[in-house]
Image (cartoon, grey):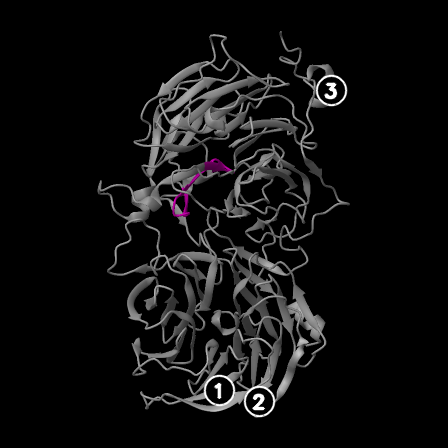
Amino acid sequence: MTNPNENSTNKTADQTPKHQYNQPQLLTTTTMGVDAVDASNSCIPPTHPLTHQSLPLPTATRGEPLFLDGNGGRLNDNDDTKVPCVMYAWGKLIVLREIDITSTTTTSTFATSATATNPSGAPSTSGFIYRGHSSPVTAAKFNPAGTYIASGDTRGKLRVWSYDHEEHLPKLEVQLLAGPIKDISWDFEGKRIVVVGEGMQSPESAKVIQWDTGVKCGDLGAHARKKGSSCAFRTCRPMRIATGGGEDASVFFHKGPPFQRVVGDGVVSEKCHERGAVHSLRYNKDGSMLASVGTDGSVCFYEGKGMGLIQKVEKVHKSSIFSCAWNRSGSHLLTCGADGYVRLLDGNAGTVVHEWDVASEQSGDTAESGVPKGAMQLGCTFIKGDVPVSVGYNGQIAVLPLPSSVGLDSSASGIDKPLILTGHQAPISAMTFGTSGSNTLYTADTDGVIVEWDGASGKAKGRVSNVGEDDPDITGKVHAGATVTSLAHSDGTLYSAGWDDFVRTTQGQSCTGKLKMEAQPNAMTCGTSLVVVMTVDGLVLIRDKQIVSSELVRLPYTATAVYLSKDDSMLYVGGDDCNIYIYTVSSSDGANPLAESHVIKGGHLKPVQSLSLSPDGSQLASADVRDVCIYSTSDYSNVVSKGRWCFHTQRIGCLAWSPDGTVIATGGNDDNIFLWCPAKKMKRVHYRFAHRGGITGLSFVGSNAADGGDWMLVSAGADGCVNWWNVEEDAKKKFGL
């Protein structure tokens, strides 16, 4: 029977007669509006003084496509104040990263841009993190207008939320599939959403619903073993839906609404790929053509309405093709594969018109010795201005140049070589500044990767690499994949301690040396020329890249925190017995370098987790899992005792004094940053939801910046972000400074 809505050009979904639907089913749905907000921690509150964010790289799984969406919708692509952005997943978070390829100069993060704006119209902070999912995110897509985003996770939950609202409020949350959602697509009206994934024990691997109610509007075909991998909504009427199988190498076609699978009409071509998965399906702009890519390395082009095969291009890549994307006009198709190449095809001729060897660009090796695992390209897209972008297994984002000879008008035509954007793929575990006045910042993560940053622009300069040690996978793991527990910078050398039981030394981005520890290092501190490493069995003293203590300095308690004065003369150690031990340091006695001079007893009810001296050395701050205390170093009397500053709810791992010593900032595993003032003990400034998973690094910029940054606070967290906060106004207003 012919669908009366098949060739309609005027009817909307709301005007379609109800008798056309086969008893719509209402799924388990939660519809949310302004009056029903599910807590406001889905993003950093807009009232916080965040000026810049350096965002993490995409999470990647070897052998699986990595979703990227660079289509910001009509409102964003047509607005010159909106910087081009790309959307991807990092664990349970969704990252929207701004990529401004027109910027040729380094601008200071201490001044907010007056031209670039974020989705809600506020000054841009280089992107943002959405934290509304409770499970790892697997797919996300903009609606055609660019005002809403639909995202799915590993538990089959779909969430629709506002992109252009400052708090990114949710509109819909619905449980669609029993397993992970692999792909999402909107219809051209922005009224329907199709998702595909793993059905597990349920009978469906794909569903199509109304975007605002979650009501089903058709029954889609189930792929073999209930595993779907990709889906695409036709971008015009008559509507079509295509779904790709995860194991059956098939593409199923559906027409509607209500949608149902088209079989046996002699036109539809379902089995055009030879084997494996159909990793990506995409319609071009006018809906005249559909492209599919998969494990067999071929690209298939189908007629958009009748869904018959137009042509099949064999062996576009030497191995699996993981992703494809059409340019804005719908004339050219971008593909990326496990061979480390990104290729651009003419959609009509089916020929490759340009290619980029991203693997060689990252490794610097053009020899045919195999593609490094980290350089396998798992995702690609076009961002605003028809700029091609791809991402590899190591998470590094490649912004690709597009030569004028291709014949496309692109913002990337002014780039002469690929721009590689680097950073962290794992939670950041440590942070420190480089030489004073150098604008250099270092961070390290739980994968053993160390990154050098330009502190003025917030841009990553590059990853630290081991000199003399091979990195065949191009993953940049300095500490062999082990967590880096702490960083310290002394005498122009960066020291990093990791759970591979080594302390490694670095100049610039070159790690040139390493020192073997007798026990696992957990923390580290430095003064002017001395470095003290805290291990599970005791302390190790290092000077000039050499261990100066004749043996491990064992303590009668378990050390939990350590801090060294600037002149290397006094060492403060927190213990698991809730006491703080003060030692004088001897540079001449290698056998007994530490002499106990005082013990602060009863200051804490829980083991001390962090310590810090004020800039003038007159006050010592300490923190546990709840309390922040301050002592005078002249007689170790209480300035702020326990029970006064007790508003953290989890371990306080970071303490940072302002350059003038009037304010101290604390960061904890409870995602909170507090500002305190010893002169105003009853007042505090509270920044909630600063980092999902907790704060692991905190410091005022101060003299570390070339132009000064006395009230610029830098934080790093387990969400892989480095945030810059201008706290001057809040601190002066609250504390009357």
Lateral position of residue 215 relative to residue 457, left or right: right
Mark 3 burial class by Cα count in 10 Å: few <14, some 14-19, many 20+: few
Viewer-nearest residue: 552 or 61: 552
Classified by dominant secondary structure, the portion drawn in magenta counts as: strand
Image quarter (top left, top right, bottom left or bottom right) of the C terminus: bottom right
Bounds of the magenta segment: 381-399
Picture residue at 49% right of the left edge, 59% below the top? 457
Q: Nearer the viewer, mark 3 or mark 1?
A: 1
Q: Nearer the viewer, mark 3 or mark 2?
A: 2
Viewer-nearest residue: 52 or 505: 505
Quadrant for residue 434, please give it. bottom left
Amino acid carrying mark 2 in the image: Tyr
Mark 1 burial class by Cα count in 10 Å: few <14, some 14-19, many 20+: many
Q: Which residue is mark 3?
A: 15
Is 395 contained in the magenta span? yes
Give the SS element for disc 2.
loop
Q: Earlier in the sequence, mark 3 or mark 2?
A: 3
Is 488 contained in the magenta span? no
Mark 2 burial class by Cα count in 10 Å: few <14, some 14-19, many 20+: some
Q: Earlier in the sequence, mark 3 or mark 1?
A: 3
Q: Which residue is mark 1?
A: 582
Give the SS element for disc 1.
strand
Real-space Cα separation, disc 3 to disc 1, in angstroms: 77 Å
Q: Which residue is mark 2?
A: 636
- Expressed as whole percent of the image width and height from the top left, the position of residue 379 reads 43, 38
332 relative to 711, above or below: above
Amino acid carrying mark 1 in the image: Ile
